[in-house]
Image: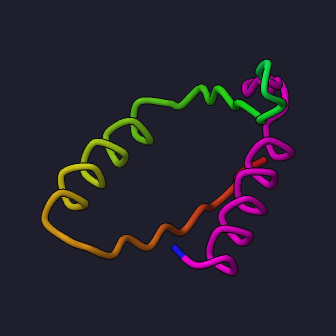
């Protein structure tokens, strides 16, 4: 993952937090790194499981994060 990809992924995470602040919790650990806990619904969990299985077979993974309000 390049610097640009990393920056885009970070922005996507921030968008997810902003989209559902009541369901997601963010905090910093002792080293100052931001930790995020996401609460996913059943469908999102299924998609994540599928992604992990697909990721094991591929070197490149692209994620599209879609927020709902």
Q: x, y (%) of residue 68?
A: 71, 51
Q: Going by the picture, which residue comes out furthest to the top? A: 30
Give the main secondary structure, helix, strand or loop, of the magenta stretch.
helix
Residue appearing at x 62%, y 30% in the figure:
38
Q: Nearer the viewer, residue 21 or 9?
A: 9
Q: x, y (%) of residue 55?
A: 25, 60
**What are the residue bounds of the magenta stretch?**
2-28
Number of marks in the image? 0
* Image position of 47 (left or right of 22): left
Residue appearing at x 20%, y 60% in the figure:
54
Q: Nearer the viewer, residue 35 or 17?
A: 35
Q: Going by the picture, which residue comes out furthest to the left? A: 57
Is residue 67 one of those drawn in magenta?
A: no
Is residue 9 one of those drawn in magenta?
A: yes
Query: Eyeballing the image, is 60 above or below 33?
Result: below
Residue appearing at x 54%, y 69% in the figure:
64
Colour setting = rainbow
Q: x, y (%) of residue 7?
A: 74, 69
Q: x, y (%) of residue 22?
A: 82, 24
Q: Going by the picture, which residue comes out furthest to the front? A: 31
Query: Eyeballing the image, is 56 above or below 31?
Result: below
């Amino acid at each position: 993952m390049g610097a640009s990809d990393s920056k885009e992924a970070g922005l996507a995470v921030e968008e997810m937090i902003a989209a559902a602040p009541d369901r997601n919790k963010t905090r910093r650990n002792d080293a100052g790194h931001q930790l995020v806990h996401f609460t996913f619904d059943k469908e999102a969990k299924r998609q994540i499981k599928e992604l992990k299985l697909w990721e094991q077979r591929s070197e490149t993974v692209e994620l599209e994060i879609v927020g709902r309000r």
